[in-house]
Amino acid sequence: MKKLLLFTVIGLGIVSCATKNTNKMMDQPREWKHTTNIYEVNIRQYTQEGTFKAFEKEMPRLKTMGVKTLWFMPITPIAQQNKKGSLGSPYAASDYTSINPEFGTLNDFKHMVNEAHRLGFKVIIDWVANHTGWDHVWTKTHPEFYLKDPDGQFHKASGMDDIIELDYKNQDMRKAMIDAMKFWVKETNIDGFRCDLASWVEVDFWQQARPEVETLKPLFWLGEFDELENPEYGKVFDTSYSWKWMHTSEDYYKKNLPLQDLKDLLKKYSAIGDSSMRAWFTSNHDENSWNGTEYEKYGVTTKPMAVFSATWNGVPLLYSGQELPNMKRLEFFEKDAIEWTPHCKEADFYRTLLNLKSSNPALRGGDSNVTTYLLNTTADDKILAYIRKNGSDEVLVILNLSKEPVDFSIQDEHLSGVFKNVFDTTKRDFNTGKDFNFNVSDYAVFEK
């Protein structure tokens, strides 16, 4: 694969790679991926009913909040053999081309997707290609599709005894998997896939699957892998996880790592370039259930970290209930509905960020026309400040990532001119002063 790679670092500024890639897969789905955000939907816990029909009633609220892409956790039926808890894991499928009756019917899902499209959403579904549950239909019809232990038994996935792994050396299994993915595109008109444990599956499968599935329509592909660790997967997927960032930022808060560690890591992510993007998040289904809510992980820096996720180069990713905010760990294998109230306290906060992300050209993800500069401040050990520029459009972000109030000034030539604070609409002329007084948890976002 031929490509031309140009990378420049200007001072603390980060200029994204300009990459020309002969792989046409990276051209799709073209425009909307640069301005989108993703909202992960946990159907089981979203409402008391836990159904597609019940969630459909929530979509106008999410549209008002600025959500663009809805990601649904697995919608396939759950295997009963060796299942965990009373309801089992959605990630242990018993059939790739059926609907989990817990959520409703195939027609219910089709209706919900059609309504989502009418409201302007894109829809992606979770795709679990690495493994199935123990009583998946293939275990009866095609046992040769699975990896086997020396004793001939199905091979359990590492550390998870409710799932068994598929054999990607089997070409017939690959074809069946691709056909199953095509089923959902043809039957329900979804717009893409979030691929679970994507790097546990051989990369050449995704290289085979994407163009074959996209004979039906251009799709959006979000892969659960970190491109710093699995760069070859980034050539196939539009967007990847930022696991290294999430773990390092949590350690930064809990173990008092130096802020420079985060800045150095951001430079490594930026060096990957713009032929693919990163998804930035403070919570998701795994993190919430097993490691705690974003407030448990990030404490007083929770909201500044959320601002970062929405404004750095890439795709913001939200989890069900963060707009409430949901302050509990949701059960994974049992019914444990989100405790909604009439007013979602953080909805306006996210609406401001998501609308800015989708409307301001300086926040386009994966666009080599956008330049991101880390700014020098008099409190570089406590303040993360950066400015993103695309022609005459500029967005300035300032975050107090410390556990104390900070008085500081920005001392950087990349900041000048009059900006408007997106949260309170006040204007500020940075030609006349760049001093700030931040309390704990403070953040500021300005657009020029």
Image: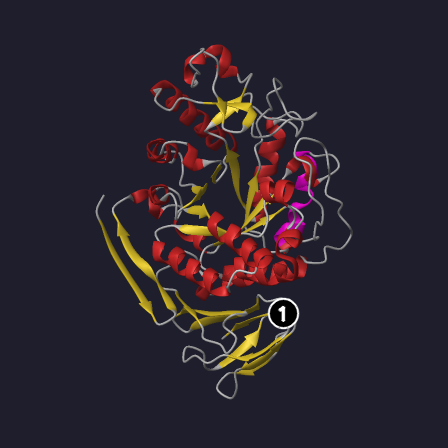
Is there any visible trace of residue 141 in the rendered image? yes
Q: Start and end of the magenta stretch? A: 51-63
Residue occupying image coordinates x 43% and y 25%: 177
**In terms of depth relative to the viewer, which is nearer, 377 or 189?**
377
Q: Would residue 61 be counted in the magenta stretch?
A: yes
Farthest residue to the left: give it.
2
For the N terminus, the quadrant is top left
Q: List x then y, in percent, for residue 108.
A: 63, 31
Q: In this view, does 46 lie above or below 87?
A: below
Q: Is residue 84 magenta?
A: no
Residue 97 appears anywhere in the view: no
Q: Give the farthest residue toward the bottom.
A: 432
Q: Which residue lies furthest to the right in this view?
A: 342
Q: In the drawing, does residue 310 fall left or right of residue 168?
A: right
Q: Which residue is drawn at 39% across and 61% down?
A: 267
Q: Residue at x 40, y 31 (%)?
A: 201
SS of the residue under disc 1: loop
| Label 1 crowd (10 A; few <14 / some 14-19 / many >=20) | some
**At which x and y percent is residue 208?**
33, 32
Label 1 belongs to which residue? 442
Q: What residue type is labelled 1?
A: Asp
